[in-house]
Amino acid sequence: MDTKKLSGAAFLAFPDMVHMLQSELSGRLGFDSKPAAVYGELLYYPDFSLDGIYDRDSGKILDRNKLPYWARTVMLEPIEICFDSIGNGAQALKDIQRSWAPYQYQFFRRANLLQERLPYVNLKVRKFPVKIPTSPIGLWTLTSENTMIASAKTSSFIPAGQIVFEEDHENPPSRAYLKIQESLTMANLLNGTELPKAGDYCFEAGACPGGWTWVLVGLGANVYAVDRAELAPELMANPLVKFQAHDAFTLKPAEIGHCQWVFSDVICYPERLLKWVKEWLESGLVDNMICTIKMQGEPEWDIIRQFSEIPHSKIVHLNYNKHELTWIHTK
């Protein structure tokens, strides 16, 4: 076996989002280099500097906002491993640390055999609610039959940076429920924020047809849902739901009252969402907020920067996001 340290970093894009990752590297981070190697949706840049972003001595990420949102995970200490057998490849990884997840884009059978030789990590579809362990998880991928690129240190505690939930094809009124399940999971993972619970008061803007409301009442929370159109009938009849037909963005926080959670998945210009968010935060009537920042054309990076600069905030791209980002603010 032969192991070689590599410079720079490697970014694993969300599925079908390589173009957004590259656009963000250039447009938001001002990094215009071309990748030295492309392994499926894993892009390796030997000249990407992690100075001020990642501290190798402590293994801590210093500034997540300087990593691309459209990377589901980042190889922070990439290495190349050459090995002569599946057993030797697995042993090379085990000699570094316990937990590893694969990114597979070729040599699938060989990759599966190698992963089977490693200590168990949960790569299965998850059932919401789920708590993700905050223990180091490495990433590796075969670049040839006897060569891999790997990194023990990555930017995500989620294996290969992608969480997939078990889907309910019968009860939710829309697939948007997956987005709030993931965003609540990320709020817990990144900030330690507990999920909404019985007795919590939630306000949801643009709630129709009710995918997010369905998740919230399933957790036992009370939901004040506002939209111009009604929710699904079963939600309209739910005693935990109060519905108002209105433009949610024109209601003042004082009219709604103190909320443990405020949510928005409204299709609107980011500037309007930012103004609404600031109004809520300045009111002092909200503990936690989760909002989808919708994109129309190229992302407006200056507006996104303003969201990121709000104290106690995180911006993430979810597995269940498309051409959008999710802003998470927790108490």
Image (cartoon, rainbow, N blue to C red):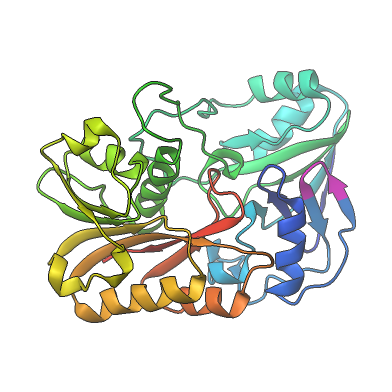
Count numbered badges in the picture. Answer: 0
Would residue 203 be seen by someone viewing this image from the given angle? yes
- Residue nearest the viewer, comparing 185 with 247: 247
> Going by the image, does 31 lie left or right of 209?
right
Q: Is residue 231 above or below residue 118?
A: below
In terms of secondary structure, what is the magenta stretch mainly?
strand
> Going by the image, does 43 lie left or right of 263?
right
Would residue 311 be seen by someone viewing this image from the given angle? no
Instruction: Give x and y (percent) for residue 307.
Output: 46, 74
The quadrant in which the C terminus is found is: bottom left
Q: Check residue 39 for magenta coloring.
A: yes
Residue at x 26% of width, y 47% of height: 195
- Residue nearest the viewer, comparing 272 with 6: 272
> Going by the image, does 241 lie left or right of 28?
left
Instruction: Give x and y (percent) for residue 156.
Output: 54, 50
Q: Check residue 282 for magenta coloring.
A: no
Residue at x 21% of width, y 39% of height: 217
**Which residues fall within the magenta stretch?**
38-42
Instruction: Give x and y (percent) for residue 165.
Output: 46, 31
Residue at x 27% of width, y 62% of height: 288
Residue at x 71% of width, y 58% of height: 20
Instruction: Give x and y (percent) for residue 203.
Output: 23, 57
The quadrant in which the N terminus is found is: top right
